[in-house]
Image: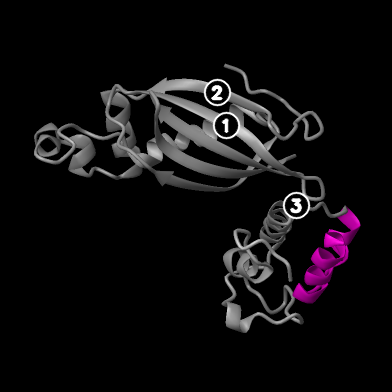
Amino acid sequence: MGENKYMKTFNQIVEELFGVKEENIKDELSSKDIPNWDSMNYLLFIAELEKEFSMSFSMDEVMNAQTLGDLRVLVEKNKK
Amino acid sequence: MNAKELSFDEIKVGDNASFYRVFMEDEVMKFAELSGDMNPLHTDISYAEGTQFKQRLVHGMLLGSLCSRFVGMCIPGKRCLYLSQNLSFKNPVFIGDEIEVVGTVIFKSEATKILTINIVMKKGKDVVVLGEAKVQVI
């Protein structure tokens, strides 16, 4: 994926912020499946993604993402 | 002392502020009472003298409260909504030690209006506490 070895990975941030063990992370998971995915934690998750990957999302992108897969795509899109 | 009232747009990565604080015995005892942490390392002179530290320590979380002061009063100040805080305690702080608190904005998330603020507390040249705060500017 070309991620710097000193940076956290997407899955590490999911585990840290949402408390989902790496082996249970799937792209189709959404706020319905993850108890810790509340509105405040979601904002913290977004801010952590932006910080770790040095990118900036728009409010629309943040509001439209429904699943972890959507967010992973968002990160990949912003890397380009 | 009035809280600053900075908007999200007024704050830039690299912005910083600092202040000094000394915790005296009555404040450590008040914190022990308020928090319920009456551990003798903080409250009992003779016990503390028998430890490697030889004197009483200021509670780590009393030092941590300076992070709350930083975000609530300095950056961003009045518009702060405190979301998260991590802390690590690097060296002991004793009653009467002067502590310098320096906070620096290291990241701004435009989409969420969240700031990441690195907070370093020093006693002289020694780092005593490191922390990272996340706050939303409301």
Check disc 3 and give the amino acid type.
Ser
Q: Image check: B20 left or right of B82?
A: left
Look at discs 3 and 1 and give the one toward the viewer. Answer: 3
**Judging from the image, what secondary structure is the residue with disc 1 in?**
strand
Residue B127 position in % (x across, y down): 41, 34
Check disc 2 and give the amino acid type.
Ser
**Judging from the image, what secondary structure is the residue with disc 2 in?**
strand
Q: Quadrant of the C terminus of chain B?
A: top right
**Residue B18 numbered mark, or none:** 2
**Judging from the image, what secondary structure is the residue with disc 3 in?**
loop
Chain ID of residue with mark 1: B
Q: Do callouts 3 and 1 point to residues on the same chain?
A: no
* Residue drawn at 88 percent across, 53 percent down: A58
* Image quarter of residue A13: bottom right
The magenta segment is A59-80
- Please give the residue where the numbered disc 3 appears in the rendered image: A54
Look at discs 3 and 2 and give the one toward the viewer. Answer: 3
Residue A59 position in % (x across, y down): 87, 54
* Image quarter of residue A77: bottom right
Determine whether label 3 and label 2 are within 8 Å by CB: no
Q: Residues within 10 Å of mark 1 (few under 14, many from 20)?
A: many
